[in-house]
């Protein structure tokens, strides 16, 4: 039995060292050197202070800010500790009720806006933590935000244009706007991602 135990313990120790210590240190080191901002959590600093992660959606409910995608992460909106989707199928009445209540909230916040509501403003994402909205979703909200802030709508639209990101590598994903960056820009903050 000892003749089998000794090699088994040696292999166990070697694999623990390689897989549990050396590999994580190497991957962390390479990530920190090649992608320092992403490895540090893509923290956005506003006027030198951390304001949030560029990768995790945050709830905004004031009419003076752009609203992100709805979250399905539980009772607390955009709970990064409990990322999840709602798992409601397209025929589930609860999904239809959720979408209807979100449409009602958007219409109540801007009753004169008769434009079609972009789907990403009324449906939760798979993770429940999407930090971005479509450019159409941002433009849909521009009038409400401009009116609530007493700003010209064209100035708000210019901020949307400035903060918009195009497809990655020219063909991955869709044009989008990071809600946190856009809202911080509305407040006139100087932004830096660390």
Image (cartoon, rainbow, N blue to C red):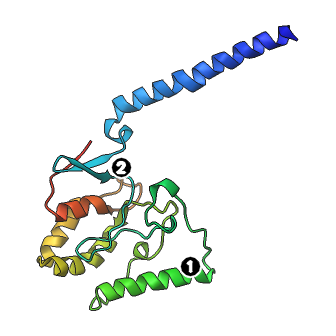
Q: Which labelled disc corresponds to residue 161?
A: none
Badge 1 crowding class, 10 Å Cα cut-off, few under 14, some 14 to 19, many 20 or more, is some
Q: Residue at x 21, y 60 (%)?
A: 184
Secondary element at tag 1: helix
Q: Please determine whether, in this image, residue 185 is positioned above or below residue 142.
A: above
The answer to whether residue 168 is above or below residue 126 is above
- Could you tell me which residue is drawn at 43 percent across and 70 percent down? 70
The residue lying at 33 percent from left, 52 percent from top is 54
**On-image quarter of the C terminus:** top left
Q: Residues within 10 Å of mark 2 (few under 14, many from 20)?
A: few
Q: Is residue 90 in sight in this rendering?
A: yes
Find residue 86 and report its horizontal and vertical position in percent.
57, 68
Q: CA distance from mark 2 to mark 1?
A: 34 Å
Q: Earlier in the sequence, mark 2 or mark 1?
A: 1
Which label sits in the foreground, 2 or 1?
Answer: 1
Single out the residue that lies furthest toward the right.
1
Q: Nearer the viewer, residue 135 or 178?
A: 178
**From this viewpoint, is residue 116 visible?**
no
Q: Residue at x 35, y 56 (%)?
A: 167
Left of 17 or right of it: where is 182?
A: left
In the rendered image, residue 191, in percent from the top left (x then y), is placed at 19, 51
The residue under label 2 is 169
Q: Secondary structure at mark 2?
A: loop
Q: How many numbered circles are shown? A: 2
């Amino acid at each position: 039995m000892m003749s089998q135990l000794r090699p088994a313990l040696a292999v166990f120790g070697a694999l623990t060292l390689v897989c549990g210590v050396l590999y994580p240190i190497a991957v962390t080191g390479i990530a920190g050197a090649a992608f320092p901002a992403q490895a540090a959590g893509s923290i956005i600093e506003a006027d030198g202070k951390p304001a949030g992660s560029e990768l995790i959606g945050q709830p905004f409910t004031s009419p003076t800010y752009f609203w992100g995608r709805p979250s399905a992460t539980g009772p607390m909106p955009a709970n990064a500790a409990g990322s999840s989707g709602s798992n409601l199928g397209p025929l589930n009445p609860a999904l239809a009720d959720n979408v209807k209540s979100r449409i009602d909230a958007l219409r109540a916040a801007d009753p004169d806006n008769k434009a079609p509501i972009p789907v990403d403003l009324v449906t939760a994402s798979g993770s429940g933590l999407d930090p971005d909205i479509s450019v159409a979703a941002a433009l849909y909200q521009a009038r409400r935000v401009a009116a609530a802030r007493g700003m010209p709508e064209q100035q708000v639209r210019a901020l949307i244009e400035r903060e918009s990101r195009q497809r990655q590598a020219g063909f991955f994903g869709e044009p989008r706007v990071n809600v946190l960056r856009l809202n911080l820009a509305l407040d006139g903050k100087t932004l830096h991602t660390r």
